[in-house]
Amino acid sequence: MSFLKSVVGGVFGFVVGGPLGAIVGASLAYQLGNSESEADTSESSQTQMAFFVATFSVMGCMAKINGRVCPAAISFAKQIMNELQLNAELRTTAIDLFRQGKQVDFPLDHVLAEFYKECRQSPALIQRFVEIQLQTAIVDGTLTSAEDELLWRVCHQLKISRFHYQRTKMRLFTQQYFYQSKIHSPTVRPASRLAEAYQVLGVSPDASQTEIKKAYRRLMSQHHPDKLVAKGLSDDRMRLAKEKTQQISKAYETIQKLGSKFTR
């Protein structure tokens, strides 16, 4: 029996097979973006289901890797539920998935394989999945060796290079650092804003204007909602993509405005 079936006592029905081949009846498919048919198993619907199931179950695995789930990880999971605007039923399912991911016999490799099979044509979705797992690991301000090894295992399964993983890790660590700094300081110095902007674009402070512009255009192309809409992503996914492009655009504007002041 699929591990997902055991989560909700056999309510799930299989549509794609394997650990990710389960959904909570027709209602889950509908709430994750299916408005055409209760039995719809379109590519878009399966992609959304795969993202939903993998995200919360692997978050549970990540949060438990050190032996104890910290309160910050639980709060972050709730934050993701809010971002995805999950209703009460889906929040309950997400919690069940999170708990299942904490189990010692959680089939991580199988789940990642199924997730990649369903979402390999959606690199932005895979990137967001990795970011969520990384944020789960560093939400307490540290990254243990066990968390780092698990994160690399996840990335390797999803065909993500170590270089890309390290770059993403550095960017999110920097964002986490400056977020914590903002909590303790009402003002953020221009130099700090500039450093954060470089991290968002994934470039070094000594990068040329050409390199900065190239990185900006690449990220905007990768995350732009107009490009992703053709892939049939749900409104929630589109909203996340819009927020991402706003962050990228703001970072580029910050570099253009402040960069010259700190490189003279």
Image (cartoon, rainbow, N blue to C red):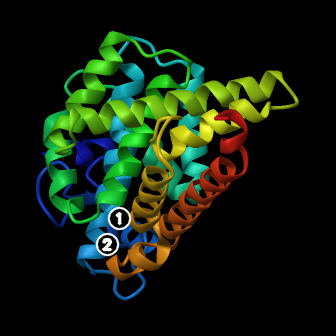
Q: Which residue is mark 1?
A: 48
- Give x and y (percent) for residue 94: 45, 47
On the picture, is 172 further left or further right than 101? right
Quick one: which residue is furthest to the right in this view? 186
Q: Taking the image as drawn, is residue 99 in sight?
A: no
Say above or below: 215 vs 30.
above
Q: Which amino acid type corresponds to the residue marked 2 in the rendered image?
A: Ser
From the viewer's perspective, is residue 151 above or below residue 257? above
Helix, strand or loop at mark 2: helix
Which residue in the structure is indicated by mark 2?
45
**Could you say which quadrant of the image residue 96 lies in?**
top left
- The x and y percentages for residue 29 are 36, 71
| Whether residue 230 can be seen here | yes
Q: Amino acid at mark 1?
A: Gln
Tell me: 30 left or right of 164. Answer: right
Which quarter of the rendered picture does the C terminus lie within?
Answer: top right
Residue drawn at point x = 31 percent, y = 52 percent:
126
Query: For the residue labelled by badge 1, is the local secondary structure a helix, a strand or a loop?
Result: helix
